[in-house]
Image (cartoon, helix red, strand yellow):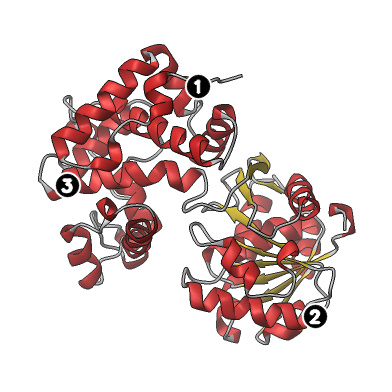
Amino acid sequence: MKANDIKTVAIIGAGDMGHGIAEICALAGLNVNLYDIKAEFVQRGTQKIKASLEKMVAKQKMAAEAMSQAMARIKGFTVLAEAVKNADFMIEAAPEILDLKLKIFREADTAAPAQAILASNTSNMSISKMGAATKRADKVVGLHFFNPVMMMALAEVIKGAGTSEETMKTTYELVGRLKNFRGPMVPVRVEKDRPGFIFNRLGAPIGLYMAELYERKMVEPEAVDAKIRSIGAPMGPYEIMDFTGLDVNLHGSAYFAETLSPDFTPRNWMKKLVEAGQLGKKTNQGIYAWPDGNRPAIDMKKADPNFDVADIICLQVNEGTKLLEEGVTASAAEIDKAMVNGGGSPFGPFALAKGMGWAAVAQRCEAISKRLGIKWFMPTQTLKKGDIKLD
């Protein structure tokens, strides 16, 4: 099947990610079957899509007729089999619970047309396991969008153990048909199904680093975030944790602890906040207060002059070399492409660190590792040898 043959997409889950994916698909002229377990969830997701498009019409960035046409392409469902029975392509956007995802893939495999591709929007979990839960592993693929979908360009196309090259190409080309408010979506191929894929995998050591520094009371979140924002980043690492949800970060850390290294075991401060129901933006309180869901007021005057942003870049480069060694991607440039389009930085970590010299980057990673007693930060052989090409 070619990307142009895809006419109807089933979105499984109408939450923040699901309705965002549904929105860009509808805007691309695709028919969208939006499913969730309750009608009220489907309705809420549909209303959020409408509100998003209404803002664009109000800003004169979209014609009212185009909005009406996009909304008319979206149909709601509360029976999964009904949502997928005429779909050419499914995108699962359910909560990050593997057993739930496996159940969805089994049901979809039974009900969807034989030629339909079944994709997961998971940010971490095994595409290979989802494929193995079906009788069409060759047509199961990862398609990982980023939140908020209407603003973030990156979409990772992930190859599971059984995913065919045809499925990879079709999915990659489908992403090429999609646009959000900022322009065309940017697909990046992930050649091997490894925890975190590319973008979140490079974020993993940063989350670990920031969590450990806060655990040891070596930094103040506001001071770090102010420093990061002072160099042009839209958000600092602690605000990002709150924005995505501390519960999501906790589960992600636990998953990395299980699949990568015990070093990622969630820190106590995060456990306590999650246990108290202080999850960040979605509960109006986390590391910061989010009044009515609005962004916290970061005092830029409090920027920590001693926090060295280069440490973050070096840890990301080191993690990137692990992806190269594991065969997740063959190109440092492709990693930079993912980081630029997923995080909003004008340059990726390899491009930023190249001027430091790879030996200096390796030395810095080793120093951080020894200072904090975290083995995961030790430099790879690839980094120590400087065997990195950006072409």
Q: Residues within 10 Å of mark 2 (few under 14, many from 20)?
A: some
| Mark 2 or mark 1, whichever is nearer to me | 1
The reply to whether the C-beta atoms of the residues labelled 1 and 3 are less than 8 Å apart is no
Quarter of the image where one finds residue 130: bottom right
Residue pictured at 56% horizontal, 40% vertical: 327
Q: Residues within 10 Å of mark 3 (few under 14, many from 20)?
A: some
Residue 95 rendering spot, x and y as whole percentages: 49, 71
Q: Amino acid at mark 1?
A: Ile
Q: Which residue is mark 2?
A: 85
SS category of the residue bearing label 1: loop
Residue 92 rendering spot, x and y as whole percentages: 62, 68
SS category of the residue bearing label 2: loop
Residue pictured at 15% horizontal, 42% vertical: 220
| Mark 1 or mark 3, whichever is nearer to me | 1
Residue 77 rendering spot, x and y as whole percentages: 69, 82
As drawn, the label of residue 190 is none
Q: Which residue is mark 3?
A: 214
Q: Amino acid at mark 2?
A: Lys
As drawn, the label of residue 388 is 1
SS category of the residue bearing label 3: helix
In the displayed structure image, the side of residue 128 where residue 360 appears, left or right: left
Residue pictured at 49% horizontal, 36% vertical: 325
Work out whether mark 1 precedes mark 3 in sequence or the reverse, and give the earlier one. 3
Asked if residue 274 is positioned above or below residue 332 in the image, the reply reads: below
The image quadrant where one finds the C terminus is top right
User: What is the spatial separation of the Cα atoms under label 1 and label 3, in whole angstroms?
Assistant: 32 Å
Quarter of the image where one finds residue 368: top left
Judging depth in this view, the residue of 384 and 280 nearest the camera is 384
Residue 295 rendering spot, x and y as whole percentages: 35, 51
